[in-house]
């Protein structure tokens, strides 16, 4: 080939620099975690982060933009490795115009960059453009303006050359293919761009967004036309480096070389080996970038994608003979080959290594146990079976944590497949059981005709804790009722309420509904999907009827305690990010009076120093007395303010922002204090795992914290009194007593050893001679397995010719020990053989080494028979 060779990193920089000469603003790659599209799991194209600019929801920083965007696509993950075409991670080069230039400039600059000797310098005669069937304008530009012969321009239909996703902006595409030579083709005379063979490689795609689809395939011209182009960086590198696949591109092959160094397998040696090398190379590359952007392994969403990639890579490492963790060692190469453009990889290197190593270690435990069960289940199938039952696959997944995709992949190696319909049905049944266990109070109202309209209950509990309300409906024992009387439990719907319903992890307010002498105690509040607040409780006195005008009062004491815990939760979230890193995301919470539970994404148990640092930061924020400002604003204003949002939550145009003097800024619909000082003392009670990749902290605030401190202080004084020491001397006194106990225990053990030795000596006197060996049997009342072992050790030390069987009976179960001295073992007498025979007589079994073996039995009536058989067993073996 006549064109120049360029490395992947050089091509990336060249593309961005070229479009800067065309007055484009160079933007850094967006995170792989979508920031403005909750429907998208991971960024999968260059234009995905720019959707708000294309739709007009937001204004771009410049009408011309160029980027190199990190992308992940996992739709065909099963094919990764099997072919050299597929990869999950790739980089998309793109130049974009938002109502500025259009087809002429896009095609001109595409051709200039690809063919100019000042830039990539590809051979013009090997470039083949394609256009949409009806796009004569693009055809004329390629043919008349650029000068590409008509026979090298291919017209393709909607499936290939028209970009649209349902209703909205759409338009024709024009792609540029590079001819890699007939030797890479299918041999057909009709072979041309669009063919499925490897001859024509698509390197550039210009999307001309010029129409609007009304959803019924009626197209109208857009007043603002946009350009969205994309060029796979790895594909361009394939062409410039004259290699057959992305796995042979310089930066990617360097990763494969590192994998080869660790596994001993080299690319091109075998088909199976190449598959594994491609899987490992692709998946660790994807994993490093995902972790760097804040994704952590978990069992759902993008965390599951990451877990699946890392575990699939680890399994292929095992196929190549590597049984210990090794992926974490490859991270350095991935970082080294990409840090030029992505310096954050080096900044987070240690963190990335730790996440990968932790996941490898966790998977090692899963796969070792799962593989054993898998093999047992597989061996039960007939040799000609082709289907692995859904029930067995579900058992592996649900009981042993074995990923279904790995089960599928391993079965392919045995030419079998999983009954996915049955597996799916079992998974669905499990989800329904979980949903039923959670319950939903509002569901119980679906079948009731309460005569209510769709107007939501008006909530005023942010501003006031007491309100005049009217009863709209009453439910007693699951039935609509006109009234509820003293002693009855009921649920009441009000037109407006100060009561905060349980939601967003915050517990419901408690309080009272009052009408004269009548009092209804509220002990739970739920909110229906339609916005009705359900006040549940019981009538303490009097009666309540529909249409009554009552006074609704929340418990001020409870509300304040909940506010303390909720504001502390925000401080805790911020402190965790400061101590552990920005990857920490809230994964759930529960806020109760002066108590909180906070679930967060993190890959390992927190160390004592980390917990202390988090607790200190929260308490320092409390002592600083930050003013807490809570107000509603537009979602864009909240983002500009740097507000933290929960991933997966759907927010409207107007959101509620809780700002703790810029120390913590979060979107939150809960109730909060007006100053952090009112949180009081904050104490972490516990930290533990609740799911893979998710940790939980439990903590207390306010009066609960004071009560805990008081209790701890009392315990310290009681302990000091019991040990006759001052509180400050407790540690020293406890250490002293622990040493005394250790010395006493050692003395007792020495005494017990002497006792065992003495008893063993007495047994030896009663041993019978059988040939050259001394055989003895004995039942030791009250002995445990450890005592029997110690006595057996003494017997072997005292006599090289000893063959002994010792037993002990406890709760109807027999423990057997057989020991053989050195000479007995040399003479062919093995403790393991003896133990198998004597335990079988008592309905048990056992085994062990030639010099020592243990077993058990259940039939105590046969114990004497078993012991008397020992002499005969030895005689037979002489």
Image (cartoon, rainbow, N blue to C red):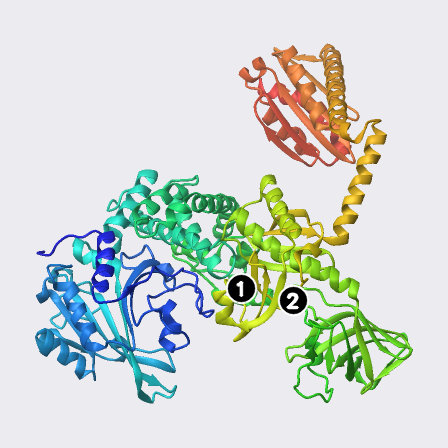
Q: Secondary structure at mark 1?
A: loop
> On screen, 272 above or below 862?
below
Name the residue located 27 percent from the left edge and 45 percent from the top edge.
254
Mark 1 or mark 2: which comes first in sequence?
A: 1
Lateral position of residue 179 relative to residue 275, left or right: left
- Any mark on residue 645, and which? 1
Residue pointed to by mark 2:
670
Question: Which quarter of the figure has residue 866?
Answer: top right
Label 2: how many residues lie within 10 Å, few (<14), some (14-19) or many (20+)? many
Query: Horizontal and vertical percent for residue 735?
Result: 73, 25
Query: Horizontal and vertical percent for residue 733?
Result: 77, 25
Q: Secondary structure at mark 2?
A: loop
Name the residue located 27 percent from the left edge and 56 percent from the top edge.
84
> On screen, 838 above or below 6?
above
Lateral position of residue 584 relative to residue 321, left or right: right
- Any mark on residue 553, and which? none
For the question of whether residue 602 can be seen, the reply is no
Query: Horizontal and vertical percent for residue 488?
Result: 87, 75
From the viewer's side, name the closer residue of 349 and 149.
349
Q: Quadrant of the N terminus?
A: bottom left
Label 1: how many residues lie within 10 Å, few (<14), some (14-19) or many (20+)? some
Query: Horizontal and vertical percent for residue 70?
Result: 34, 59
For the question of whether residue 757 can be seen, the reply is yes
User: CA–CA distance between discs 1 and 2?
Assistant: 13 Å
Lateral position of residue 143 relative to residue 71, left or right: left
> On screen, 537 above or below 873?
below
Question: Which quarter of the figure has residue 804?
Answer: top right
């Amino acid at each position: 080939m006549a064109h120049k060779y360029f490395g992947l990193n050089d091509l990336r920089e060249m593309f961005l620099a070229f479009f800067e000469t065309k007055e484009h603003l160079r933007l850094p790659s967006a995170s792989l975690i979508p920031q403005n599209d909750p429907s998208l799991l991971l960024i999968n194209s260059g234009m995905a982060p720019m959707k708000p600019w294309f739709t007009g929801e937001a204004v771009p920083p410049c009408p011309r933009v160029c980027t190199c965007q990190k992308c992940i696509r996992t739709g065909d993950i099963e094919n990764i490795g099997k072919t050299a075409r597929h990869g999950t991670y790739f980089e998309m080069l793109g130049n974009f115009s938002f109502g500025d230039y259009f087809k002429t400039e896009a095609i001109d600059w595409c051709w200039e960059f690809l063919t100019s000797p000042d830039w990539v310098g590809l051979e013009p005669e090997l470039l083949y453009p394609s256009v949409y069937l009806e796009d004569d304008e693009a055809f004329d530009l390629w043919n008349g303006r650029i000068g590409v012969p008509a026979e090298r321009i291919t017209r393709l239909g909607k499936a290939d050359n028209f970009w649209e996703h349902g209703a909205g902006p759409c338009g024709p595409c024009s792609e540029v293919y590079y001819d890699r030579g007939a030797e890479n083709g299918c041999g057909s005379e009709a072979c041309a761009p669009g063919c499925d063979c490897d001859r024509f490689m698509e390197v550039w795609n210009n999307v001309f967004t010029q129409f609007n689809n009304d959803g019924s395939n009626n197209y109208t011209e857009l007043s603002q036309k946009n350009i969205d182009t994309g060029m796979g960086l790895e594909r361009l590198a394939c062409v410039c480096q004259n290699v057959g696949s992305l796995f042979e591109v310089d930066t990617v092959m360097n990763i494969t070389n590192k994998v080869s160094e660790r596994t001993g397998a080299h690319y091109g040696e075998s088909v199976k080996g190449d598959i594994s090398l491609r899987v490992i190379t692709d998946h660790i590359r994807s994993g490093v970038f995902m972790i760097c952007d804040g994704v952590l392994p978990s069992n759902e969403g993008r965390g599951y994608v990451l877990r699946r990639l890392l575990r699939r890579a680890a399994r292929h490492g095992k196929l190549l003979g590597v049984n210990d963790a090794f992926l974490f060692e490859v991270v350095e190469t991935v970082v080294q080959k990409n840090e030029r453009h992505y310096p954050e990889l080096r900044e987070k290197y240690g963190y990335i290594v730790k996440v990968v190593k932790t996941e490898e270690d966790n998977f090692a435990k899963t796969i070792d146990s799962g593989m054993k069960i898998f093999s047992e289940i597989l061996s039960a199938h007939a040799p000609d079976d082709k289907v692995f039952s859904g029930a067995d696959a579900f058992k592996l997944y649900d009981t042993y944590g074995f990923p279904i995709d790995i089960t599928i992949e391993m079965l392919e190696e045995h030419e079998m497949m999983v009954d996915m319909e049955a597996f799916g049905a079992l998974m669905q049944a499990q989800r329904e059981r979980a949903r039923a266990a959670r319950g939903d109070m509002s569901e119980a109202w679906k079948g009731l005709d309460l005569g209510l309209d769709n107007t939501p209950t008006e909530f005023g509990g942010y501003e006031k804790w007491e309100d005049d309300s009217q009863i709209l409906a009453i439910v007693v024992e699951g039935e609509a009722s006109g009234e509820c009387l003293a002693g009855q439990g009921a649920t009441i719907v009000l037109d407006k309420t100060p009561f905060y319903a349980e939601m967003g992890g915050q517990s419901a307010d408690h309080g009272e509904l009052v009408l004269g002498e009548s009092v209804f105690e509220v002990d739970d509040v739920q909110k229906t999907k339609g916005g009705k607040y359900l006040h549940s409780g019981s009538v303490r006195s009097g009666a309540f009827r529909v249409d009554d005008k009552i006074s609704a009062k929340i418990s001020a004491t409870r509300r304040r305690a909940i506010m303390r815990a909720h504001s502390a939760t925000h401080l805790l979230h911020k402190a965790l990010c400061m101590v552990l890193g920005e990857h920490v995301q809230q994964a759930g919470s529960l806020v109760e009076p002066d108590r909180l539970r906070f679930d967060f994404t993190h890959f390992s148990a927190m160390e004592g120093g980390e917990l202390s640092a988090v607790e200190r930061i929260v308490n320092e924020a409390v002592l600083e007395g930050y003013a807490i400002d809570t107000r509603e604003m537009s979602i864009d204003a909240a983002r500009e303010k740097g507000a933290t949002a929960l991933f997966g939550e759907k927010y409207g145009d107007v959101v509620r922002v809780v700002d703790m003097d810029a120390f913590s800024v979060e979107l939150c619909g809960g109730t909060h204090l007006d100053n952090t000082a009112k949180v009081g003392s904050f104490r972490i009670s516990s930290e533990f795992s609740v799911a893979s990749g998710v940790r939980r902290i439990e903590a207390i605030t306010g009066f609960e914290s004071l009560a805990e401190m008081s209790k701890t202080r009392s315990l310290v004084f009681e302990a000091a009194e019991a040990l006759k020491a001052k509180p400050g001397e407790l540690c020293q006194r406890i250490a002293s007593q622990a040493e005394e106990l250790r010395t006493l225990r050692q003395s007792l053990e020495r005494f017990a050893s002497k006792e065992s030795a003495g008893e063993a000596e007495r047994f030896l006197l009663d041993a019978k001679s059988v040939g050259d060996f001394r055989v003895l049997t004995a039942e030791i009342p009250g002995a445990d397995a450890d005592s029997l072992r110690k006595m057996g050790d003494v017997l072997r030390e005292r006599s090289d010719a000893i063959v002994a069987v010792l037993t002990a009976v406890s709760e109807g179960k027999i423990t057997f020990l057989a020991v053989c001295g050195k000479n007995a073992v040399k003479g062919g007498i093995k403790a393991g053989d003896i133990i198998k025979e004597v335990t079988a007589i008592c309905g048990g079994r056992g085994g062990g080494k030639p010099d020592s073996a243990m077993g058990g039995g259940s039939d105590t009536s046969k114990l004497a028979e078993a012991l008397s058989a020992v002499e005969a067993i030895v005689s037979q073996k002489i």
